[in-house]
Amino acid sequence: MLLSKGFEVEMYTGTPQGDTVGLSDQIVAKVEGFVREPDSRNVEYTTAPLCSYAQLLCALVKPRLKLRSYLNTLGDYTIIPGSTLSLGGSHTFERSDPKNPYHTYIQETYGAKIVTTSIHINVGISDPELLMRAIRLIRMEAPLYLALSASSPFLDGQATGFHSTRWATFPKTPAYVPLFESHSHFIKWTEEKIATGVMQNVRHLWCSVRPNGDRRPYNLNRLELRICDFVSNPIMQLALVALLEARLWQLIDDPSLDPLEKSNLSATNRLEDLAALADNNEIAAAHHSLEAQLSHWQDGRTILAKDWIEEIYQQVLPYAKKLGFSCFLSPIKKIIREGNTAQKWLDQYNSSLDSRSVIKAAILEMVQQEEELEDQLCQSMVA
């Protein structure tokens, strides 16, 4: 039996020319499964927890097709790829729910920095101490998932110098998040942050990876990887979750893979040093994604992100083969070989194409990918 997994998918809506348009009020009222974000220019849908990769692929594609069908009734509107307001609008905040006090707090505290899109990957792990061990490992390797998914090199029509402008500017909260030694450590830390007002509620933990569950921080049942930029290609989305699941099966098979045990960093300050290393690697990955020079959590050596991903890929491939999902893992090799979305967009941008032309082409490519998947994989499941 595979682990259960699901996505939370945030997307912008707008015109085929790449301009974002706030439509979330109408979408949420008419299209089942979509919910508001604080800003009306993006919406979110969530897939149910599923073990099957084929079913998960259809669960990713079906809501997009429903959304596109509804957008056509409103006019010439579409889904816009990327994780930032690539072509403009980053200085405004278009509230989706003016009466929501939490949204008011977000707008007044962070402004439009949080008006981004992403994919959050949830993987079910019911044992709380195994979950905390998994959180520690994936916290140290989260920059690799950012490197694979980076898709936000533009803001307001300009190249920013980052491959993931979203993660480079996103207001991670609290500013410092430790490596949690145990479930009880996570409970105590969360209670303290809420009591002091650093966190407004249990959802107000905006970091690369966090424990999640029905009654946080007490009842936990899944790991939530939050660092990934929006990935428009559903096949590539599945590759990310396949890499994550395979790594977690490796950890289940070998509990000593825990960074608290396996790292060669000094035991005296290991928790603090590992957290600092992870934070620095996240910044480097936001800058240069697959070409970023990172510090390995195990021994501190410098390693290119794409080389580190290749190392892990070779380690986890036997688990994916044994459990029957290696075909969903294999697109990781293509990303390493051909580059991620940000790298491809920047190549086009640097070849005299302006950012609008890049985004317009990406919009058309996204439509084509979904149509091909609908025809090939889940025609019978799409109403």
Image (tube, rainbow, N blue to C red):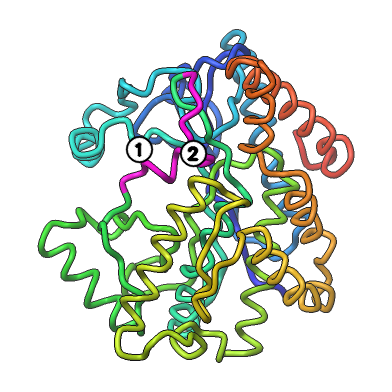
For residue 124, which numbered disc appears in the image? none
Q: Residue furthest front?
A: 302
Say which of marks 2 and 1 sits in front. 2
Q: Is residue 165 magenta?
A: yes
Q: Mark 2: which amino acid?
A: Phe
**Marked residue nearer the N-terminal end (2 or 1):** 1
Q: Mark 1: which amino acid?
A: Ile
In the visual, does 218 lie left or right of 351?
left
Rendered location of residue 316, percent (x, y): 73, 75
Rendered location of residue 265, percent (x, y): 42, 84
Picture quadrant of residue 53: bottom right
In the visual, does 192 lie left or right of 142?
left
Picture quadrant of residue 368: top right
Dot 1 crowding, Cα within 10 Å, few <14, some 14–19, many 20+? many
Q: Is residue 125 above or below residue 157?
A: below
Residue at image mark 1? 114
Rendered location of residue 282, percent (x, y): 45, 56
Quadrant of the snapshot with the N terminus: bottom right
Magenta range: 157-171
